[in-house]
Amino acid sequence: MKSLLASLFLALAAAADLAAVSGPALAEDTGLVPLRTLDDSRGWEAVGRLDIGGRAFCTGTLVGVDLVLTAAHCLYDRETGERVDAGEIEFLAGFRNGQAIAYRGVSRAVLHPGYAYGTEPGADRVRNDLALLQLRQPIRNTRVRPFGIGGRTGAGKVVGVVSYAHDRAEAPALQESCRVLEALDGVLVLSCAVDFGSSGAPIFAFDGGAPRIVSVVSGMAEMEGRPVSLGTALEAPLALLQGMLASDRNILSGGDALQRVPAHGAPRGIGAKFIRP
């Protein structure tokens, strides 16, 4: 059977329509449920909006009292291609309806050393599209509980995603059930519904009851005319980032000058180009 990953192709439109995918393989997908009220959002407060210099936003998730997980490309200015000063990023935990449970600036940021923003989109960029941010002050609030990290997940597994997007900037939405269509060499292809602003959103597995993060939204694409999302596998890359943060390697601190990070080498292609949400 032809690989799903190999059959992906890009929708060249600036903003693709990413409504829920139809078709027999995706029949169990659920729709997006807005988390606008206290009751709706209970248990998801550690997912927050990352405001990037007042110019853009992504989705981030608390994975420690002072650590936020997101996508590496969120740390770059789309207009200039330059890395954003960590001091220009703010994490809004549980943000909804104009208010957050906690507001925290970012003191340090580290991204995967294999990630190169300036390269052509492809599998290499997706599998390395991960960043870890350290907050200026920890969030110690009983309502905001950091999420644990899950193990590997494979094709056919049911997962869920909580994300902000351009059309839900004031409150996140939960898609409780979508599917991993394929998992290949650090890249997950999923049926989960994402859109611009969903970058860095946590993808959860529910094995054992409590949700655990198994992937982070990196991009969106089309497969056979249907929208799909692309995720980054977590275990090894996250451990690498935690080690880099502990050893002060390749870290951008708040107040540092903006810097251009050069691309090194061409990515290994998989016959697809991607749109970043």
Image: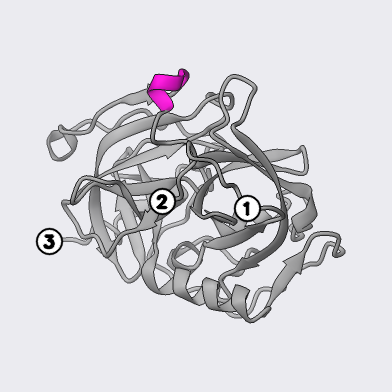
- Work out whether mark 1 precedes mark 2 in sequence or the reverse, and give the earlier one: 1
Q: Secondary structure at mark 3?
A: loop
Tell me the amino acid under the disc marked 2: Phe
Marks 3 and 1: in contact by CB < 8 Å?
no
The vertical placement of 142 against 261, above or below, is above
Which residue is identified by label 1?
138
Q: Secondary structure at mark 2?
A: loop
What is the count of numbered marks?
3
**Which residue lies at the image location 19% right of the left edge and 37% below the top edge?**
26
Query: Residue 1 has which mark?
Result: 3
Tell me the amino acid under the disc marked 1: Pro
**Which residue lies at the image location 16% right of the left edge and 51% below the top edge?**
156
Q: Nearer the viewer, residue 241 or 80?
A: 241
Where residue 169 sits in the image (x, y, percent)?
58, 27
Marks 3 and 2: in contact by CB < 8 Å?
no
In the image, which is nearer the foreground, mark 1 or mark 3? 1
- The reply to whether residue 88 is visible in this rendering is yes
Q: Secondary structure at mark 1?
A: loop
Q: Main secondary structure of the magenta part?
A: helix
Is 271 covered by the magenta stretch?
no
In the image, which is nearer the foreground, mark 2 or mark 3? 2
Query: Residue 252 has which mark?
Result: none
